[in-house]
Image (tube, helix red, strand yellow):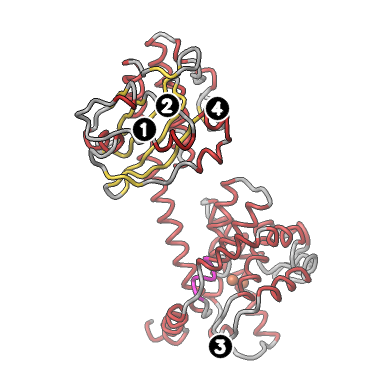
């Protein structure tokens, strides 16, 4: 089997197996065979958001539906995640279409179609939403149709179950379209096919959620350990949080792929992990450093790279490069290798802008924050000297997003108290005492 991009841009198995846009007219046994192939394709997507998009898209294709919505179970509620509506998207564009949808959270109860489906674990095939049987505990809310001018008619809702049988979400498709594009009821075959598809989708979602949880726990562990080095240097963990977001903003702005951006974002907090190896008398010296002390201080790049080197985990490998090169300067006057220009790895050049901006724009134990205009003036003045000029331009173009990150991760007095308390426990003296 050769992994190939599908028509929706997802990695999947061989395309000729998989193109099921016209599945509607196929005999049932071919539809079922197609379903198995889609199931295999679902297993190849491990990134949750991508997977959810793919599930909705395929559910619509399998049953010839015009729209689709996916809810995930979270904390005993159903959380709205993805919605598609091809007619509306064609008419007003996807962005504007999404403006009509709120990110709803609804109870798992008989107060809604999706809630009932999650509660009972049964598919619901409604031929006409405006003629629901009077004994149904819920009604169709016509508000969205009224606001958008769209006419919802038929709806098919199926539960998605995980490996152990619990409901992980609900898949809902809207308006089965006939050959003329007119909405008609979903056929019993559609109900059977969508239920079978939802069974595969549920397991894939659960796998992707477990992967994501594992990824997050690895990231959290690395972040906390990086935070320990920051506390030794009397910096708050907000510094590495903000700095890694600034690195993400730059990486996105220069057009790196989603995976590359994520990798830089998660590697950036480890840039100063080598400060663990710098003695307090130098790390905390208030006045200027002697030449010998400066050499020791600058060795934090090499120490960090040594701590992180040799990993086959890509993000840790990238962190090693970043730790080694975040003090290199574009004009070749940085350290430790005096690299210049594009010979400095991109992650090091990105981290340099993000790190210096945050160091200047934030309050530290020993100084107040510089005003923003002064910091930006400095970045501009250092274009082509300290910093890669293109990356500074990119940073400035995205300054609004930078400000949002700053506002979200402000240092508080509590953070500074935590520094005082933790840095005394992490001092050389305290470590010696404990040993
Ligand atoms: Fe550093
Ligand atoms: Fe830093």
Ligand 2 image-quadrant field? bottom right
Which numbered disc covers residue 59?
Answer: 2
Q: Residue at x 38, y 16 (%)?
A: 32
State the separation of the CA atoms marked 3 and 1. 61 Å
Asked if residue 424 is positioned above or below residue 258 in the image, the reply reads below
SS type, badge 2:
helix
Ligand 2 within 8 Å of the CB at mark 2: no
State the separation of the CA atoms marked 4 and 1. 21 Å
The residue under label 1 is: 171
Residue 373 location in percent, x, y?
A: 70, 73
Q: Residue at x 50, y 68 (%)?
A: 409
Name the N-terminal-most of marks 4 and 3. Answer: 4
Residue 54 location in percent, x, y?
A: 47, 32
SS type, badge 4:
loop
Disc tally is 4
Instruction: Determine whether label 2 and label 1 are within 8 Å by CB.
Output: yes
Helix, strand or loop: magenta stretch:
helix
Magenta highlight range = 236-241
Name the N-terminal-most of marks 3 and 1. Answer: 1
Viewer-proximal residue, 123 or 41?
Answer: 123
Viewer-proximal residue, 242 or 346?
Answer: 242
State the separation of the CA atoms marked 4 and 3. 59 Å
The residue under label 3 is: 281
Q: Residues within 10 Å of mark 1 (few under 14, many from 20)?
A: many
Q: Please identify the quadrant where the C terminus is shown.
A: bottom left
Asked if residue 111 is positioned above or below residue 184 in the image, the reply reads below
Instruction: Determine whether label 4 and label 3 are within 8 Å by CB.
Output: no
Viewer-proximal residue, 245 or 106?
Answer: 106
Q: Residue furthest left?
A: 135
Mark 3 or mark 1, whichever is nearer to me: 1
The residue under label 4 is: 6
Mark 4 or mark 1, whichever is nearer to me: 1
């Amino acid at each position: 089997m050769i992994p190939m991009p599908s028509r929706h841009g997802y990695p999947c198995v061989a395309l000729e197996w998989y193109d099921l846009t016209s599945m509607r007219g196929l005999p049932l046994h071919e539809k079922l065979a197609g379903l198995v192939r889609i199931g295999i394709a679902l297993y190849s997507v491990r990134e949750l958001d991508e997977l959810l998009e793919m599930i909705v898209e395929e559910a619509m294709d399998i049953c010839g539906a015009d729209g689709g919505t996916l809810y995930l179970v979270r904390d005993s509620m159903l959380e709205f995640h993805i919605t598609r509506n091809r007619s509306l998207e064609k008419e007003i564009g996807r962005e504007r279409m999404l403006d009509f949808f709120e990110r709803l959270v609804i109870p798992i109860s008989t107060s809604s179609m999706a809630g009932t489906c999650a509660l009972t674990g049964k598919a619901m095939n409604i031929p006409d939403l405006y003629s629901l049987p009077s004994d149904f505990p819920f009604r169709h809310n016509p508000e969205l149709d009224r606001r958008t001018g769209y006419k919802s008619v038929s709806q098919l809702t199926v539960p998605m179950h995980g490996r152990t049988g619990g409901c992980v979400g609900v898949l809902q498709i809207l308006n089965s379209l006939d050959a003329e594009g007119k909405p008609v009821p979903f056929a019993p075959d559609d109900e059977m096919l969508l239920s079978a598809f939802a069974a595969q989708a549920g397991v894939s979602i659960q796998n992707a959620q477990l992967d994501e949880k594992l990824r997050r726990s690895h990231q959290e562990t690395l972040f906390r350990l990086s935070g320990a080095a920051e506390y030794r240097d009397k910096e708050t963990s907000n510094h590495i949080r903000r700095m890694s977001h600034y690195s993400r903003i730059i990486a996105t702005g220069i057009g790196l792929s989603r995976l590359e951006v994520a990798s830089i974002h998660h590697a950036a907090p480890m840039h100063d992990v080598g400060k663990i190896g710098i003695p307090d008398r130098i790390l905390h010296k208030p006045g200027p450093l002697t030449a010998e002390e400066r050499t020791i201080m600058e060795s934090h790049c090499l120490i960090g790279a040594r701590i992180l080197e040799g990993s086959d985990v890509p993000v840790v490998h990238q962190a090693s490069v970043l730790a080694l090169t975040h003090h290199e300067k574009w004009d070749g006057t940085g350290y430790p290798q005096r690299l210049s220009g594009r010979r400095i790895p991109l992650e090091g050049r990105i981290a340099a802008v993000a790190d210096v901006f945050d160091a200047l724009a934030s309050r530290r134990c020993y100084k107040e924050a510089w005003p923003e205009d002064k910091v930006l003036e400095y970045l501009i003045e250092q274009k082509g000297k300290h910093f890669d000029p293109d990356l500074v331009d990119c940073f400035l173009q995205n300054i609004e997003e930078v400000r949002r990150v700053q506002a979200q991760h402000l240092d508080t007095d509590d953070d500074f108290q935590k520094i005082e308390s933790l840095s005394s426990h992490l001092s050389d003296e305290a470590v010696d005492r404990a040993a």
